[in-house]
Image: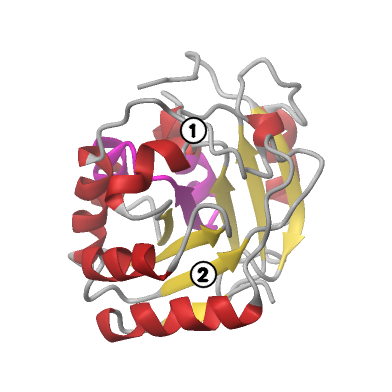
Amino acid sequence: MLIVGEARMKIAGIQRLTLLDYPGKVACTVFLAGCNMRCVFCHNSNMLDMKCKAAVSEEELFDFLKKRRGLLDGVCITGGEPLLSPKIEPFIRKIRELGFAIKLDTNGSRPDVLKALVNEGLLDYVAMDIKNAPDRYAKTIGLDVFSIESIRESVAFLLRDALDYEFRTTVVDEFHDEAAFLEIGKWITGARRYFLQPFLDSDFVPKKGLHAPSHDRLLRCKEVVRPFVNMVDIRGI
């Protein structure tokens, strides 16, 4: 399994205001560099390598957050894969001490870190990517070999309702079909929320020529999952 990370944190981007990334809250989004997956449809591929350029320093980020107390409700932490950072716990703790709610985006590959952060009471909401049906995972995330057990562990942990969460899948015509969503539905049975997000092309997407599914196909996939979860919807259309 490929691990990309260093004993330091690099802030690869910051969105200073978002009304979409954190459900029900006015927030900012912080992008951390480094990822252990190589999804060919990723639109943040410029952030996957720790050699990428930092957007701001930690000092600059915390100066910004101190000025936004009372204006922002929360901070979304995304990537890359933020749980690869060895400094993620003190980083989140410092943000939380400023009074912000914390939403974490994760690919679920570090269940040990996820559990530790939840047990410490440092997270308020988790959005976990379900890349594909279990037997399609390695191909979907761009790796020759991948053990899905870490993903299974994270899914099982969130299904225990230790905190508020959602699962989500970026739907790419070349990678996903109704059979895949039947397997995903069975896998996440009982989930609070599940979102299908159509693929969006950009200059940063590594593989050219990929396509978003049609609206009709998204609706069919949504109906396949509906019997298994409490709420399923399509986001981004």
Q: Secondary structure at mark 2?
A: strand
What residue appears at the point 41 percent right and 23 percent down from the top-left corner? 86
Residue 124: where, in percent of width, then height?
Answer: 40, 61
Say which quarter of the image contains residue 71: bottom right
In the rendered image of this protein, does residue 168 appear above or below residue 215?
A: above
* Mark 1, residue position: 142
> Mark 1 and mark 2: span between their CA atoms?
20 Å
What residue appears at the point 33 percent right and 55 percent down from the top-left corner? 133
Query: In what quadrant of the picture does the C terminus appear?
Result: bottom right
Residue farthest toward the right in the current orientation of the protein = 203
Q: Is residue 165 left or right of residue 135?
A: right
In the rendered image of this protein, does residue 103 appear above or below residue 231?
A: above
Q: Is residue 83 left or right of residue 75?
A: left
Q: Is residue 139 left or right of residue 210?
A: left
Say what amino acid the circle numbered 1 marks: Gly
Give the residues in magenta: 92-115
Q: Nearer the viewer, residue 159 or 41?
A: 41
* Mark 2, residue position: 196
Residue 97: where, in percent of width, then height?
Answer: 49, 48
Q: Is residue 192 left or right of residue 152?
A: right
